[in-house]
Image: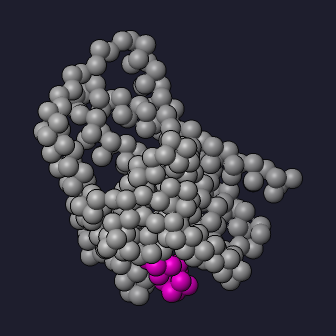
């Protein structure tokens, strides 16, 4: 009965995160719009940050409770899931051609963040210097998005008037904002607590729980977005969002967890030797060939799924 309750609460946490994130993104977008911020900039900043809020909160709560392996496992695991599973499915269904200039800086920023975190694994911790470097990469990502959005608006001659606001809209969106934020926070707490308890009962390490159940759970919004994009034949939208979400995951979560704990964030030897290089490898397979060929190809989707499947098997059997 105890195991049933733990699993039920774990699933409830995932549902709250997904639904809460949906409400929060809608409300955050609406609030930004009525303030007069153009939609292009909203999408580049507010929405992209809001969609990664589940991963950020889950890792912060885990770090605050001393569950370092789960905190890092969720951050790194979410990136590995996003690329090795979610992006792979997108490429498998709809390979597509890109413009190198649209993906070059984002891809390099993501790979640079991966490389820094792999380096941190060799050092054995995420310290102040690494945290500052990761924050700088995050700043560069947002700066590029805002710059591109403004340039696009100038070229297209876009001007957006503030929408007419009704009382009903205000009440509805404030409620979405409040309940969405509360759902994410409560869901994250349930996910961390019951994920840890499930690991204890099953004799599984918090690292594996963070890399599997928690990482997949917090990445479900990206998975749903990708499935929708595939159905609508908009694979490029899905891949662009995944790269952006990964940059935020890599450059915000670990530095914030380190700041919250008030000290350097220790990285376990097994994570440094296996999980971090695996994340880097999967990222390289997804992005480096594309930067040369200017194509996301079906073979990459197959390779990514194979690598991710092998990684999961080794992780669970280790």
Q: Nearer the viewer, residue 235 or 218?
A: 235
The quarter in which the C terminus is drawn is: bottom right
Residue lying at the far right in this picture: please name it: 1
Q: Residue at x 20, y 54 (%)?
A: 143
Q: Position of residue 56 (x, y in %)?
A: 45, 55
Query: Is residue 267 something that shows in the picture?
Result: no
Q: Nearer the viewer, residue 198 or 229?
A: 229
Q: Residue at x 27, y 63 (%)?
A: 100
Q: How many marks?
A: 0
Query: Is residue 290 something that shows in the picture?
Result: yes
Side (left or right) of 100 relative to 316 = left
Q: Nearer the viewer, residue 15 or 279?
A: 279
Side (left or right) of 159 relative to 218 = left
Q: Residue at x 37, y 48 (%)?
A: 48
- Using the rendered view, name the quadrant where residue 89 is placed: bottom right
Magenta segment, which residues?
Answer: 267-281
- Asked if 161 appears above or below 68 in the picture, the reply is above
- Asked if 95 appears above or below 308 in the picture, the reply is above
Side (left or right) of 140 relative to 197 = left
Q: How is the image coloured?
A: one colour
Q: Main secondary structure of the magenta part?
A: helix
Q: Residue at x 75, y 53 (%)?
A: 7
Q: Position of residue 156 (x, y in %)?
A: 17, 36
Q: Position of residue 217 (x, y in %)?
A: 60, 54
- Using the rendered view, name the quadrant where residue 248 is placed: bottom left
Q: Position of residue 65 (x, y in %)?
A: 54, 62
Let me know if residue 168 is in the magenta part: no
Q: Nearer the viewer, residue 70 or 49?
A: 49
Residue lying at the far top in this picture: please name it: 167
């Amino acid at each position: 009965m105890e195991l049933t309750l733990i699993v039920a609460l774990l699933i409830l946490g995932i549902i709250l995160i997904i639904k809460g994130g949906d409400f929060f993104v809608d409300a955050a977008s609406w609030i930004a719009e009525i303030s007069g911020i153009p939609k292009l900039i909203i999408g580049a900043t507010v929405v992209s940050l809001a969609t990664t809020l589940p991963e950020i909160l889950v890792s912060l709560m885990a770090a605050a409770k001393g569950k370092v392996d789960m905190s890092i496992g969720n951050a790194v695991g979410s990136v590995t899931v996003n690329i090795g599973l979610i992006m792979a499915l997108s490429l498998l269904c709809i390979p597509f051609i890109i413009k190198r200039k649209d993906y070059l800086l984002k891809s390099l920023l993501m790979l640079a963040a991966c490389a820094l975190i792999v380096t941190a694994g060799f050092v054995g911790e995420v310290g102040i210097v690494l945290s500052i470097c990761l924050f700088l990469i995050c700043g560069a990502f947002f700066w590029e998005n805002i710059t591109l959005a403004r340039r696009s608006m100038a070229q297209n001659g876009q001007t957006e008037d503030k929408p007419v606001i009704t009382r009903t809209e205000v009440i509805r969106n404030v409620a979405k904002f409040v309940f969405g934020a509360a759902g994410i926070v409560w869901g994250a707490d349930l996910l961390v607590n019951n994920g840890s308890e499930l690991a204890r009962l099953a004799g599984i390490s918090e690292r594996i729980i963070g890399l599997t159940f928690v990482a997949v759970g917090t990445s479900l919004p990206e998975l749903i977005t990708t499935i929708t994009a595939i159905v609508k034949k908009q694979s490029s939208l899905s891949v662009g969002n995944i790269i952006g979400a990964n940059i935020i995951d890599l450059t915000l979560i670990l530095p914030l967890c380190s700041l919250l704990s008030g000290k350097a964030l220790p990285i376990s030897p097994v994570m440094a030797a296996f999980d971090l290089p695996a994340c880097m490898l999967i990222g390289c397979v997804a992005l480096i060939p594309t930067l040369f060929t200017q194509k996301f190809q079906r073979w990459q989707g197959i390779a990514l799924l194979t690598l991710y499947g092998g990684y999961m098997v080794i992780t669970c059997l280790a």
